[in-house]
Image (cartoon, grey):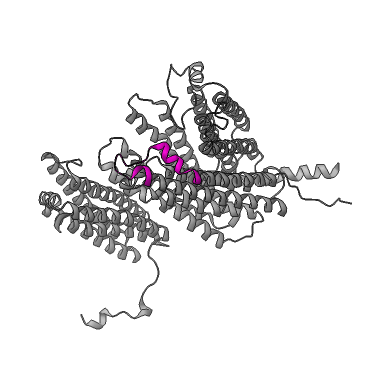
């Protein structure tokens, strides 16, 4: 790939906001909540270094990595499905959406397994401040994955009915939400599991 | 005579559905109670600095109870009036039973009046005894002081009210505004049921007490406010319903998520698990967001208006309520919502400052927005009052609103000084509660003066209802 292909002239930039403005406002609100949680986590870590270090050592990094890959894969499949729906290939779009939902289910199963491992060790949300924040932040994110899956199912049903022939704004809005869920995890994983 | 008949005839035509007129007694009675609330506010404001003023016949605790209970009851009357006006028009059908609405009005008005008279003329313990509180004890808790039989009356009135509205919605058009409004009103009724649960453990009592108080004002009431504001904005701006409804969805989603989880900001002193401090602090810190969205949305819709509505006063109220709700509920709430801050500020005058501006900005003003929009139509005047009446109404708006800003600022000043003198110093160095109150008297005097201006504003507002356009005699 030549460097030239990476340079985009200002005229070629599509300035249209994908999806609906209201969804972007909602995404902004969601990101604000997560930002506050991340800031709270980072600041608290500065005051409780040892506790946080010990807490992180008890987390399953490989499970976190599997979840990262599952969510990125799912997001990628949604991008592909968006591409195909605009080409009118509805059947392929539905298959890709189902695959993206399967990838999201991999995330959910792994996350539940992780929680169970901690519960077996006698660790819960009240163990210490690290695990309070761990369960709150990952739990809140988990709820977003559930909502995201519901949205993806709705989109898939709508594609099946041929609902995006005139406008794909609704599809784009749902996809944007799903990417937000993915983005949050990409920050969450290193902050809580690794750093 | 003929002219009179013609006027009367045209009066009937200013309403799209004649049953909307049942809102009128609700609005009128709400305004009477509002006047009472302000008078008792002025009385107790004075008792803050002149402790024995009328302390015999109306002790401070009674004045406070009457002040806050009148507020709650007049807002409920206002919400009911607003719903009876709004729902038929949105559903495009007459109200299911206007008679039921009128009967419930008289039941609620009689029960409310008797309760207030009971507070004023009978010692509270006697009131508890004669109303059978020992059978099902629910009295004696802040804002929920009503005798148990009054509480049962409120539930029955709410059930009849919801039945009437529900049947109207079921037989008519289902709009987002109606559905959001009815959801908010059902939530109001459901959460009130926690008023009947009164455990002996004080922490548990307070825990469930917040299920009524918090989940009303920072939960379902925001749905009611959002729906009424959306309705008035559609009417006065002519902006597409789809645009307004979409924003309503976003706002109520944010309001519910931040409001429900934000309940945790009250649990600091209730020995709930420590994670509630995190949940309460973080989510309630975001409670200003839906209010800020309402400001953007109200101003944006008015700027994109497709018509010049003659009711300028209603537009002013709609914009005003969004701004004041953001400041009072949003900003002043945020001031003391974080657990480490609330450790020092809990129950100080900062809470009183927030309470005053939030209730006025979010709920008193949204009811007055609706009254401003509806009353000219209900009274057969037309789309709007005459110019002179609107000028008086806008004077009322500005005097009351600016006075409320000053009341809030003076109480905030008092609160900050209170924290400084009474809460921050280490044990032994801190001033006692009463010694601190003495030091705050200048703020209380200033608050009382601002309260007098508020009352003058209220008189100007009431005056606007009695100004009629001078009609040239027809020849």
What residue is at 36 percent from the left and 50 percent from the top?
B285
Q: Residue B44 or B15: which is nearer the viewer? A: B44
Image-based side of B295 in relation to B465, left or right: left
| Residue B425 belongs to the span the image colors magenta | yes
Number of marks in the rendered image: 0
Q: Nearer the viewer, residue B154 or B333?
A: B333
Position of B13 with respect to B97 (left or right) is: right
Q: Position of residue B301 (x, y in %)?
A: 53, 59
Q: Residue at x 10, y 51 (%)?
A: A57
> Residue lying farthest right?
B475
Q: Which residue is at a point 40% across and 44% down the rendered structure image?
A: B418
On the image, the x and y values in percent for residue A139 come to 24, 47
Q: Nearer the viewer, residue B336 or B211?
A: B336
Does residue B300 belong to the magenta stretch?
no
Q: Magenta stretch? A: B420-443
Whether residue B235 can be seen here:
no
């Amino acid at each position: 790939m030549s460097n030239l292909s990476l340079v985009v002239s200002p005229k070629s930039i599509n300035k249209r906001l994908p999806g609906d403005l209201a969804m972007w406002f909602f995404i902004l609100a969601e990101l604000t909540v997560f930002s506050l949680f991340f800031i709270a986590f980072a600041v608290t870590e500065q005051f409780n270094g040892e506790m946080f270090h010990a807490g992180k050592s008890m987390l399953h990094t490989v499970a976190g990595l599997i979840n990262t890959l599952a969510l990125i894969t799912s997001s990628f499949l949604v991008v592909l499905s968006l591409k195909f729906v605009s080409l009118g290939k509805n059947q392929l779009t539905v298959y890709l959406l189902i695959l993206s939902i399967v990838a999201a289910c991999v995330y959910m199963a792994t996350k539940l397994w992780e929680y169970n491992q901690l519960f077996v060790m006698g660790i819960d949300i009240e163990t210490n401040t690290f695990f309070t924040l761990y369960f709150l932040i990952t739990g809140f994110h988990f709820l977003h994955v559930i909502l995201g899956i519901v949205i993806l199912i709705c989109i898939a049903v709508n594609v099946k009915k041929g609902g995006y022939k005139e406008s794909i704004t609704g599809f784009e809005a749902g996809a944007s939400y799903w990417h937000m869920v993915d983005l949050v995890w990409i920050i969450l994983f290193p902050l809580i599991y690794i750093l | 005579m003929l002219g009179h008949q013609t006027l009367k005839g045209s009066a009937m035509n200013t309403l799209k559905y004649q049953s909307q007129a049942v809102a009128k007694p609700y609005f009128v009675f709400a305004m009477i109670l509002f006047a009472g609330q302000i008078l008792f506010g002025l009385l107790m404001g004075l008792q803050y600095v002149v402790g024995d003023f009328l302390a015999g016949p109306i002790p401070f605790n009674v004045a406070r109870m009457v002040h806050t209970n009148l507020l709650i009851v007049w807002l409920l009357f206002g919400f009911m009036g607003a719903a009876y006006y709004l729902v038929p028009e949105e559903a495009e059908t007459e109200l299911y039973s206007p008679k039921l609405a009128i009967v419930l009005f008289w039941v609620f008005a009689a029960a409310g009046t008797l309760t207030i008279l009971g507070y004023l003329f009978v010692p509270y313990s006697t009131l508890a005894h004669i109303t059978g509180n020992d059978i099902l004890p629910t009295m004696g808790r802040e804002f929920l002081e009503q005798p148990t039989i009054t509480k049962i009356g409120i539930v029955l009135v709410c059930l009849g009210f919801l039945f009437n509205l529900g049947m109207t919605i079921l037989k008519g058009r289902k709009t987002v505004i109606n559905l959001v409004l009815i959801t908010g009103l059902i939530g109001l009724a459901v959460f009130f049921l926690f008023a009947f649960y009164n455990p002996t453990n004080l922490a548990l009592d307070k825990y469930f007490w917040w299920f009524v108080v918090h989940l009303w004002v920072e939960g379902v009431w925001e749905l009611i406010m959002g729906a009424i504001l959306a309705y008035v904005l559609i009417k006065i701006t002519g902006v597409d319903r789809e645009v307004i409804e979409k924003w309503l969805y976003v706002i109520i989603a944010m309001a519910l998520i931040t409001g429900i989880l934000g309940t945790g900001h009250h649990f600091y002193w209730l020995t709930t698990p420590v994670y509630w401090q995190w949940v309460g602090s973080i989510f309630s810190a975001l409670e200003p967001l839906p209010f800020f969205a309402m400001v953007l949305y109200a101003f944006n819709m008015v700027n994109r208006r497709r018509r010049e509505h003659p009711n300028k006063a209603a537009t002013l109220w709609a914009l005003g309520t969004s701004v004041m709700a953001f400041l009072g509920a949003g900003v002043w709430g945020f001031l003391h919502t974080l657990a480490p801050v609330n450790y020092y500020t809990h129950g100080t005058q900062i809470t009183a400052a927030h309470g005053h501006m939030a209730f006025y900005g979010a709920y008193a003003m949204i009811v007055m927005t609706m009254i401003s929009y509806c009353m000219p139509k209900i009274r057969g005047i037309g789309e709007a009052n005459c110019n002179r009446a609107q000028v008086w109404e806008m004077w009322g708006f500005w005097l009351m609103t600016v006075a409320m800003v000053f009341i809030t600022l003076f109480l905030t000043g008092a609160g900050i000084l209170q924290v400084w003198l009474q809460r921050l110093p280490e044990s032994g160095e801190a001033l006692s509660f009463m010694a601190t109150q003495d030091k705050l008297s200048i703020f209380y005097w200033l608050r009382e003066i601002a309260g007098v201006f508020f009352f003058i504003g209220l008189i100007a507002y009431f005056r606007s209802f009695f100004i009629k356009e001078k009609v040239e005699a027809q020849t």
